[in-house]
Amino acid sequence: MRITEIFKKQKHTFSFEFFPPKDEITAVEFGINAGQLMRLQPSFISVTYGAGGSTQERTFNLVDLFQNKLGLTCMAHYTCVNASAQKVSADLDYLYSRNIENLMLLRGDPPKGQQSFIATSADFTHASDLIRLAKSQNRFSIGAACYPEMHIESRDTDEDMQFVKEKTEAGADFLVTQMFFDNSFYYRFVERARAAGITCRIIPGIIPVINYHQIKKFVEVSNATIPRQLATILESYKDNEKKSYQIGVDLAINQCEDLLNHGAPGIHFYTLNKSRAVIDIYESLSLRYKC
């Protein structure tokens, strides 16, 4: 089923992002955690795509498993870094042949060792180019990324919003945000998007932060602002795993409740292939949202 059809039936969607396990050992743990999360009956799930297509085979195999063996609505991430139009068309044909009707289309991160993005193909310099090609086939429901605190490569918020609008004009059916920890960034982003004429669903992406080491890593790899209070509290309990976990889960529950109370159309959980925190958060959300 296309995700756009799910939107017609569900006022709020709850979805999970996974990444392909890298070896047999992590695959066992992945299977356990994914199985536990599937019991929550998510609206849909997504599977990430490694930098430069490094996990393409594993990504495609995993979405095939979720979609065709387990009967879940699955969205495949796909990027256009170092890709030609011919390769992209062939890959999209393959996904469609495997009954994959939902795509999260991204420009993608630079290959490992490359500091900034350098286009190697005239076919694709932005995610909107990839979206436009996929939309022309009229076979997919298409999601795109957005950044409440602005993409790290954008000069300012106006330029950033222009890139987002180009994605929706190219054919993106909905947007999923990068992680954020201060809801005011999401609310301001949605307000600016509506003012720019963007009308599609903008689903907040949430990641549970359950220890101080995660905070440090997220600061390094994303443009997300970590609230001082959250960082201070987790640092004070960095040697108390149980306390740090509960603080992180409680804060995520409050964040999700606030988002849903203020009109967010659901929550997309970045699971990091772990189940416990997401299950605790989801089960604590009011039942009135789960429809």
Image (cartoon, rainbow, N blue to C red):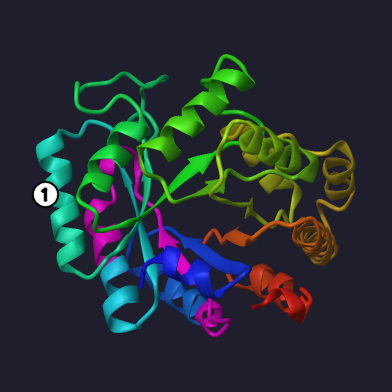
Q: Residue at x 29, y 32 (%)?
A: 129
* Residue 29 placement (x, y as % from top left): 46, 73
Amino acid at pointer 1: Ala
Placement of the C terminus among the 4 image quadrants: bottom right
Is the residue marked by circle 1 packed among few (<14), some (14-19), or many (20+) residues within 10 Å? Answer: few
The residue at the far top in this view is 155
Q: Is residue 216 above or below residue 289?
A: above
Is 180 positioned to the left or the right of 228 in the image? left
Task: Give the magenta-colored segment's residue range.
Answer: 36-62
Residue at point 65%, 33% (across, down):
195
Left or right? Give the position of 92 relative to 51. left
Image coordinates of residue 128 in percent, x first then y, are: 36, 33
- The N terminus appears in which quarter of the rendering? bottom left
| Above or below, 104 relative to 182 | below
Magenta run includes residue 55: yes
Query: Magenta stretch: residue 16 in it?
Result: no
Task: Judge whether 24 appears above or below 54 on screen.
Answer: below
> Quadrant of residue 100 in the image?
bottom left
Is 210 placed left or right of 137 in the picture?
right
Q: Secondary structure at mark 1?
A: helix
Residue 152 appears in the figure: no
The answer to whether one can see residue 35 in this image is: yes
Percent across and percent down for residue 198 are 55, 39
Instruction: Tell me what residue is drawn at x 82 percent, y 42 percent.
Output: 231
Which residue is depicted at the point 27% across and 79% down?
68
Disc 1 designates what residue?
90
Location of residue 203 (image quadrant): bottom right
